[in-house]
C-alpha cells in the first residue's frame, strides 16, 4: 500500500491549485458537482490533518472563516490552503528547529549583528513557495499539448521539455527545503492509516478522471 510523504502533500496542493485557480472555489460546496476536484480537495484535507497543518484548537480564526461557515465540524476552508502556501502554520509552532533552513538563511548575513529569528523561517518559506508555484507553471507549460501540428512546434516542445528536465533537478533542492519546514518530524503515513484515522478518500481517481473527461 502506498506511503504518503511530504512530497505527495506538496504535489497534491500544487496540482489542485492549478486545476482550481479560483480560490473562491476552494470549498466543498463549490466543488460538489466536480467529483475529480472534490476528491482531491478532501484528500488534501486529510493530509493537512495528518501532517498537523490544520488550525490548532483555540487558534486564531480568520475573519473570512467567521463569515463563511460557523460549523464546528467544518472541512478544509479556502484559508487553510492559503495558510499552507503562505506558511502561516509556522507561526503556530513553538520551539521547532529547522537546522538546514537556518543555515541557508544565516549565509546571507550582511552584518555580524544580524541574528536569526523565528520569523526568518516564515519569510524564507513564503518567498520560496511563491517561487515554487511560478516554477510549477513553467514545468507544466507543455502539459496541454496532445499533438504538435508542425516541425517548428515539435522542435519548440522538444527544446522546452529538455530545459524543464534540467530545471526539475534544481526544483528538487527547493522542495527539500520546503519539506523540512512543512514536516520537521519527517512523518510518513500509510494509506491505510490515512483512511482509518484521517478520513482519506479511497476513490479510484484515475477511473473518475476518465469518466469526467
Image (cartoon, grey):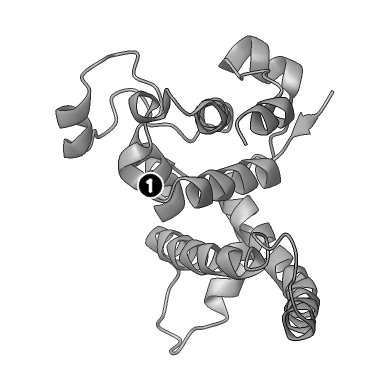
Judge from the rendering whether residue 148 lies leftward or rightward of residue 69; answer left or right: right
Above or below 138: residue 91: above
**If the image is split into quadrants, where does the N terminus sit?**
top right
Asked whether 30 or 79 is in front, the reply is: 30
Q: Quadrant of residue 203?
A: top right
Asked whether 71 or 155 is in front, the reply is: 155
Q: Residue at x 68, y 18 (%)?
A: 202
> Mark 1 falls on what kind of element?
helix
View extreme (right): residue:
1
- The percent position of residue 39, horizontal first and vertical second, equals 56, 26
Judge from the rendering whether residue 161 lies leftward or rightward of residue 141; answer left or right: right
Above or below 105: residue 56: above
Q: Quadrant of residue 152?
A: bottom right
Above or below 29: residue 158: below
- The percent position of residue 18, horizontal first and vertical second, equals 51, 52
Q: Residue at x 57, y 81 (%)?
A: 107
Asked whether 50 or 65 is in front, the reply is: 65
Q: Which residue is mark 1?
A: 82
Circle 1 residues within 10 Å: few <14, some 14–19, many ≥20: few
Count of numbered circles on the image: 1
- The percent position of residue 7, horizontal first and vertical second, equals 69, 47
Judge from the rendering whether residue 20 lies leftward or rightward of residue 1; answer left or right: left
View extreme (bottom): residue:
110
Q: Residue at x 68, y 68 (%)?
A: 171
View extreme (top): residue:
196
Q: Residue at x 43, y 24 (%)?
A: 33
- The percent position of residue 155, horizontal first and vertical second, equals 79, 83
**If the image is split into quadrants, where does the C terminus sit?**
top right
Q: Is residue 181 visible?
A: yes
Amino acid at each position: 500500500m502506498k506511503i504518503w510523504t511530504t512530497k505527495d502533500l506538496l504535489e497534491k496542493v500544487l496540482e489542485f491549485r492549478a486545476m482550481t485557480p479560483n480560490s473562491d472555489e476552494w470549498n466543498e460546496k463549490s466543488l460538489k458537482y466536480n467529483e475529480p476536484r472534490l476528491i482531491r480537495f478532501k484528500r488534501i484535507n486529510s493530509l493537512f490533518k495528518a501532517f498537523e497543518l490544520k488550525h490548532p484548537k483555540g487558534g486564531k480564526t480568520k475573519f473570512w472563516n467567521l463569515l463563511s461557515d460557523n460549523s464546528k465540524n467544518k472541512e478544509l476552508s479556502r484559508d487553510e490552503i492559503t495558510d499552507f502556501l503562505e506558511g502561516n502554520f509556522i507561526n503556530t509552532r513553538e520551539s521547532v528547529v529547522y537546522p538546514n533552513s537556518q543555515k541557508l538563511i544565516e549565509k546571507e548575513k550582511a552584518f555580524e549583528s544580524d541574528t536569526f529569528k523565528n520569523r526568518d523561517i516564515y519569510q524564507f518559506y513564503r518567498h520560496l513557495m511563491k517561487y515554487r508555484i511560478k516554477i510549477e507553471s513553467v514545468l507544466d507549460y507543455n502539459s496541454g499539448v496532445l499533438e504538435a501540428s508542425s516541425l517548428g512546434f515539435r522542435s519548440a516542445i522538444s527544446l522546452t521539455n529538455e530545459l524543464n528536465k534540467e530545471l526539475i533537478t534544481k526544483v528538487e533542492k527547493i522542495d527539500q527545503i520546503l519539506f523540512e519546514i512543512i514536516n520537521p518530524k519527517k512523518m510518513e503515513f500509510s494509506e491505510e492509516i490515512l483512511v482509518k484515522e484521517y478520513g482519506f478518500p479511497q476513490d479510484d481517481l484515475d477511473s473518475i478522471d476518465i469518466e469526467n473527461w
